[in-house]
Image (cartoon, rainbow, N blue to C red):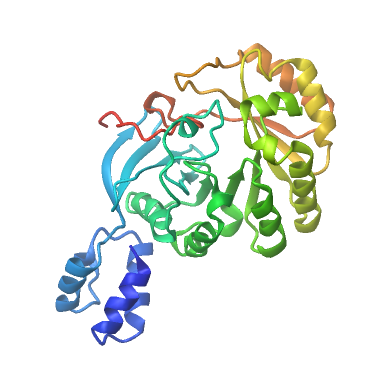
Amino acid sequence: MDLALLDKTLAAGGQPKYRAGQIWDWLAGGVRGYHEMSNLPAGLREQLALEVPFSTLELVTEATAKDGTVKALFRTHDGHPVEAVLMRYKDGRRSICVSSQSGCPLTCTFCATGQMRFGRNLTPWEIVDQALHFRRKEAINHCVFMGMGEPLLNLDNVLAAIERLPDIGITHRRTSISTVGWLPNLTRFIDEVEIPIRLALSLHAPDTATRNKLMPVNEKYPLEAVLAECHRYSVLRKRRVYIEYVMLSGVNDRPDQGKALAKLLGREHFKVNLIPYNPTGGQFDGSSRERIAAFLAELERGGVPTTVRLTRGRDIQAACGQLAAERAPAA
């Protein structure tokens, strides 16, 4: 819901200021429409239904994977596609992966989103409405900005959306922002944002030449400068930076590259998350289990905390790197 439009509409109708808070409380609790807001006058509910859309996003399709992951495809009021994902885990975590842009302008070669046309930045309300869509299904408690787009290219709107997430059930400590290393706003994020949001860096290579091929942004903001800022974040905030590293067969998965990555990162400030490559119909193949295990062994030998990501939703193209706003199969 566009809360700015809501405030304007309520003020124009002479409604008391507390009405906006009442409506937000209902939204954050997962109601499905104005008709469920029982402490609002019936006439006001009817007016709002006509003048303030319940969501800034229109649900186009939704699909559920064999593992319970749900992918939703939305359209904005001006026709831009947006995808978001709900991941369900056996330990009770309900994590949502949300988008900050429609498409992405940074064209990473292994990512499906980077191959689609860039639309625009999403508003805070369009980001929050992704979360509210899944909140209407069940309680949610984690959020990652790892969907479509580069969050640091839309930092103000992302932060405005994050301010609302605790009311929905997602604390700041359970919220993560993933960046390819957009340096100006990475510096701003470190210097200005004091709430304890987790920082993740999409790295994907331990050397400049390989990263240049995979991620054109590296030519603009080199690896060394980005890692220096991440190191500064870790020292300042006393938190590790999560390193995302997608495993591409014959490209970045050799044991010597694992050894180089361990040397580059060190033991203290980073934690690596190795990501099995999810097919996107492009030029790459995923690394074998054996190659991933050998790469992992080099990192562990170097003392770098490392995990291998559990793939979720691959059968509905909802896994890491697969979001491309294609029409999802029916659930």
Q: Relative to 4, is 84 above or below?
A: above
In the rendered image, which quarter is residue 297 located in?
top right
In depth, the one of 205 and 117 nearer the eye is 117
State how many labels appear: 0
Residue 212, horizontal then vertical, whole percent: 68, 28
Residue 157, horizontal then vertical, whole percent: 50, 59
Residue 14, horizontal then vertical, whole percent: 26, 87
Q: Residue at x 55, y 25 (%)?
A: 110
Q: Residue at x 68, y 20 (%)?
A: 252
Q: Residue at x 76, y 41 (%)?
A: 270
**Placement of the N terminus among the 4 image quadrants:** bottom left
- Note whether residue 239 is visible: yes
Q: Is residue 63 left or right of residue 222?
A: left
Q: Relative to 170, is 327 above or below?
A: above
Q: Relative to 237, is 66 above or below?
A: above
Q: Is residue 149 left or right of residue 197?
A: left
- Note whether residue 206 is visible: no
Q: Residue at x 50, y 44 (%)?
A: 93
Extreme residue in the front direction: 220
Q: Is residue 76 left or right of residue 121?
A: left
Residue 89, horizontal then vertical, whole percent: 48, 38
In depth, the one of 321 and 32 nearer the eye is 321
